[in-house]
Image: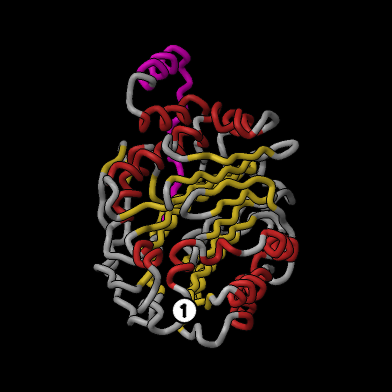
């Protein structure tokens, strides 16, 4: 791995607010924030807007370092590189207050930095980040929890949440609808070198087309952007849901992320299809998947099914509960199950049914298995022909057989 380079792993901040005027809150709310004021906040974070798209539900901005989404009562901002994301908290709370919106929940998440020594204050360590959050959030957000889901040195997951006790009461229609959604965040490293070259040069639109990113969700309106000399970002909007992809393709510290929103009412296969397409586009050597949901729905099973179908082996699984409305924590039932996936063992943790107001963050670390080397050229050619006639699971698994 390179000693230094661009930091692909993003920091992600999600803030929820309540408004005094139900009519404005349900229509525009925080979307009324003046763009010039948003630019000032982003300047503090050390990034800027490079492209934008919007619909009747929310505004989506592609940033010079990742993305910003603004809903009537919610702001999501994720930034990569050496940005100082947490410095946006106070300004955003202040701007929202000027629109008669009061913060009720805060969630901060990130993976393990590839180059932690390059991060500036307040991101030099998770303990420093937590301390900064504690000092800059209003005291009324008294339900707080910080946790490191440390299942891997390279793909650990850091989570901090804070909320107002009883904040689940009297929330907007938007927030009530969001209670039935889940968020999936995928972090991928060691990208396939050939596929990563597609993110060098060219336009954002051509990268979207050539790589097949447009096919992840054909219904989405995509706003994409290319970076010089390499790199790619996109936001997709589909009704009130967003999706986003960010790519750092340089060899030695290659990284890609995919994030999307789903609903518990979706077809179980929808998420499986999307994740299969994402893995096919990047073919990472290692990836982690984190899901967040506040309802009793087994999103983890959907993710696990998708990972098995693309030939990836689950190395570890962690789950934790983060109170969102002052409700008590529920215990986690830990167990192991064993199943066959091309001769591999897959293990996961099974959680108990979650109650309303709790956010669960299941977290996986996965990697492609290292198969035996095929030295015989004729056998390799036969295997190649067989592989391309099979499903994607064997196709991706076979790629590694042929390259080792």
Q: Image check: 246 left or right of 115? A: left
Residue at left offset 42%, top offset 48%:
239
Residue 107 in the magenta stretch? The answer is: no
The one of 109 and 319 positioned closer to us in this rendering: 109
Q: In the figure, residue 342 lies in which quadrant? A: top left
Question: Residue 241 placed where, x, y %?
Answer: 43, 51
Residue at left offset 48%, top offset 46%:
237
Q: Image check: 287 left or right of 324? A: right
In the rendered picture of this protein, how many numbered marks are placed on residues?
1
Instruction: Inspect this view and state whether residue 49 appears.
Output: yes
Q: Is residue 383 above or below residue 256?
A: above
Question: Residue 325 placed where, x, y %?
Answer: 38, 78
Q: For mark 1, does the 10 Å Cα neighbourhood hold few (<14), some (14 to 19), or many (20 or more) residues? A: many
The span shown in magenta is 364-387
* Label 1 secondary element: strand
The one of 241 and 95 positioned closer to us in this rendering: 95
Q: Is residue 98 above or below residue 246?
A: below
């Amino acid at each position: 791995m390179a000693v230094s380079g661009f930091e692909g792993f993003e920091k992600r901040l999600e803030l929820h607010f309540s408004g005094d005027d139900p009519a404005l809150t349900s229509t525009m709310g925080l979307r009324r924030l003046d763009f010039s004021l948003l630019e000032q906040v982003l300047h503090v974070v050390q990034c800027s807007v490079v492209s934008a798209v919007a619909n009747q539900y929310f505004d989506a901005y592609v940033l010079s370092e990742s993305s910003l989404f603004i809903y009537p009562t919610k702001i999501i901002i994720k930034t990569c590189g050496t940005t100082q994301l947490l410095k946006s908290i106070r300004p955003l709370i202040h701007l929202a207050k000027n629109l008669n919106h009061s913060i009720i929940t805060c969630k901060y998440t990130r993976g393990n930095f590839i180059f932690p020594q390059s991060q500036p204050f307040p991101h030099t360590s998770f303990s420093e980040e937590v301390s900064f959050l504690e000092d800059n959030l209003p005291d009324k957000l008294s339900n707080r929890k910080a946790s490191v889901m440390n299942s891997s040195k390279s793909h650990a997951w850091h989570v901090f949440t804070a909320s107002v006790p009883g904040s689940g009461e009297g929330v907007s229609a938007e927030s009530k609808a969001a209670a039935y959604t889940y968020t999936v965040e995928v972090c991928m490293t060691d990208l396939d070198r050939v596929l990563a070259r597609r993110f060098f040069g060219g336009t954002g639109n051509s990268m979207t087309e050539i790589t097949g990113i447009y096919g992840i969700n054909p219904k989405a309106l995509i706003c994409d952007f290319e970076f010089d000399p390499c790199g790619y970002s996109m936001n997709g909007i589909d009704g009130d849901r967003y999706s986003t992809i960010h790519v750092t393709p340089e060899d030695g510290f290659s990284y890609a992320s995919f994030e999307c929103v789903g609903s518990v009412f979706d077809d179980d296969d929808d998420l499986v299809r999307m994740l299969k397409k994402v893995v096919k586009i990047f073919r990472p050597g290692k990836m982690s998947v984190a899901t967040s949901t506040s309802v009793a729905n087994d999103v983890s099973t959907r993710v696990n099914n998708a990972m098995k179908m693309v030939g990836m082996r689950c190395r570890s699984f962690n789950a934790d509960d983060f109170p969102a409305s002052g409700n008590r924590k529920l215990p986690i039932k830990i167990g192991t199950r064993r199943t066959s996936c091309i001769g591999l063992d897959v293990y996961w943790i099974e959680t108990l049914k979650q109650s309303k107001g709790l956010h669960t963050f299941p977290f996986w670390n996965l990697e492609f298995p290292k198969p035996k080397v095929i030295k015989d050229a004729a056998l390799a050619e036969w295997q190649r022909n067989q592989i391309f006639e099979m499903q994607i699971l064997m196709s991706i698994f076979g790629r590694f057989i042929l390259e080792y």
